[in-house]
Amino acid sequence: MYAQMVKSTGAGVKSLDEMEPQERAFQERINAGDKIEPKDWMPEGYRKNLIRQIGQHAHSEIVGQLPEGNWITRAPTLERKAILLAKVQDEAGHGLYLYCAAETLGVTRDELTKMLLDGRMKYSSIFNYPTLTWADMGAVGWLVDGAAIMNQVPLQRTSYGPYARAMVRICKEESFHQRQGFDIMMTMAKGTDAQKHMAQDALNRFWGPSLMMFGPSDENSVHSAQSMAWKIKMNSNDELRQKFVDQTVPQAEYLGLTVPDENLKWNEEKGGYDFSQPDWDEFFDVLRGNGPETTERMEARNKAWDDGAWVRDGMMAHAAKKKAMKVAAE
Amino acid sequence: MSTNDWPLWEIFIRGAHGLSHRHVGSLHAPNAEMAIKNARDVYTRRKEGVSIWAIESSAIAASSPEDKGSLYDPADDKVYRHPTFFDIPDEVGAM
Ligand SMILES: [Fe+2]
Ligand SMILES: [Fe+2]
């Protein structure tokens, strides 16, 4: 998802009886549905895992602005441009809500940023793909934000209070994102042959990478089991991917577009679609830093940070000078 | 990398006239004026507020979770503070 393949530090999930009293009390609070707040005691593994997960999620929101930012100046109408601008601004907001939540765990935003910029922390694989045509703005909103919603809605119930509250704010804004994307797709799909072709091409390119957003199957993963016990992960990757496919296929049919999967078939027995797995070799290759746009994205983030340094420093200098003047006047 | 980290501010927003300010989150800004401007962009993009307070996080004093028991103890044995403690006969009417 926006946080993919987050590895936990624990070796496996302990039973309540194997835990020291403090840890047991902590786990019992989680089991009872209590929220954990910043000053509460928590196991080191829980803290570290959350920093990685929330940090990766925050980085994804920020880097995720780039593929869409690419089209702001070339939106087909002034209205589309204003909408896309508002959508991308929301994503900046999402990044900030999440950095705040991570900071309550004892890491600073600047430290997290540094780890993104030097490659120690990751962001979602999906943002390493290029946005080649205007139809991609439709596909991204419809599919990428759609997949993100699948994951974020259950995270509103996550055990860590600040994370859960950030998710509530984010979810309120996400359905605008998905709808504006679907609206673009509807217009394109009802348009000229060339537009319809662009819409189909965008779906073809984003379908697989969207399925990858949920991460590989984690049914047997110790990391996932621990995260689920801590309620910082609410569903298995396969479960969410299935839900996404079941929701999205009828929408594609409505658009008159074809999902690029020969094996896609309704399975009456399971009450869901059978579908092909995306190309997991490609996924791992992207995670290793070989995505089609990875270099571009990292360069853009580093450039923004470096070019903004004089602004950050100047504003601090100005604030210090004003403070000094105020002290002198008193 | 700049070592000039902007301080952290806690943001409180009054959602509508007549309501109290409520904590909505935090953000970084070089000073109070910028904290309020940033809060407008981060927390009120959909008219979520009519008034914003910003206070530097380091200026906030907070009770600690370990106080849970002792800090609130004095309230435990004063059930008479709740109106339901008193039985008023039905004949008296609404009170
Ligand atoms: Fe977002
Ligand atoms: Fe979004």
Image: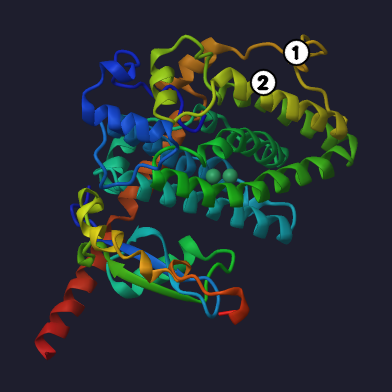
Residue A53 drawn above or below residue A93: above
Q: Is residue A250 above or below residue A305?
A: above
Horizontal side, residue A313 vs residue A147: left or right: left
Q: Are marks 1 and 2 on the same chain?
A: yes
Residue A270: image tag:
1
Q: In the image, is A141 to the left or to the right of A305?
A: right
- Res B67 visible: yes
How crowded pointer 1 is (Cα within 10 Å; few <14, some 14-19, many 20+) is rated as: few
- Front-most of residues A195 and A251: A251
Along the viewing direction, whichever of A5 and A190 lies nearer the viewer: A5
Kind of residue indicated by mark 2? Gln
Tell me where residue A326 sits by quadrant. Answer: bottom left
| Residue, disc 2 | A242
Image point 43% across, 19% down: which residue? A224
Q: Give the x, y percent position of residue B33.
A: 34, 75
Which is more N-terminal, label 2 or label 1?
A: 2
The residue positioned 13% from the left and 79% from the top of the image is A324
* CB atoms of marks 1 and 2 within 8 Å: no
The residue carrying pointer 2 sits among few (fewer than 14), some (14 to 19) or many (20 or more) residues within 10 Å by Cα, namely some
Q: Could you tell me residue A189's position as x and y percent?
A: 85, 37
Q: Secondary structure at mark 2?
A: helix
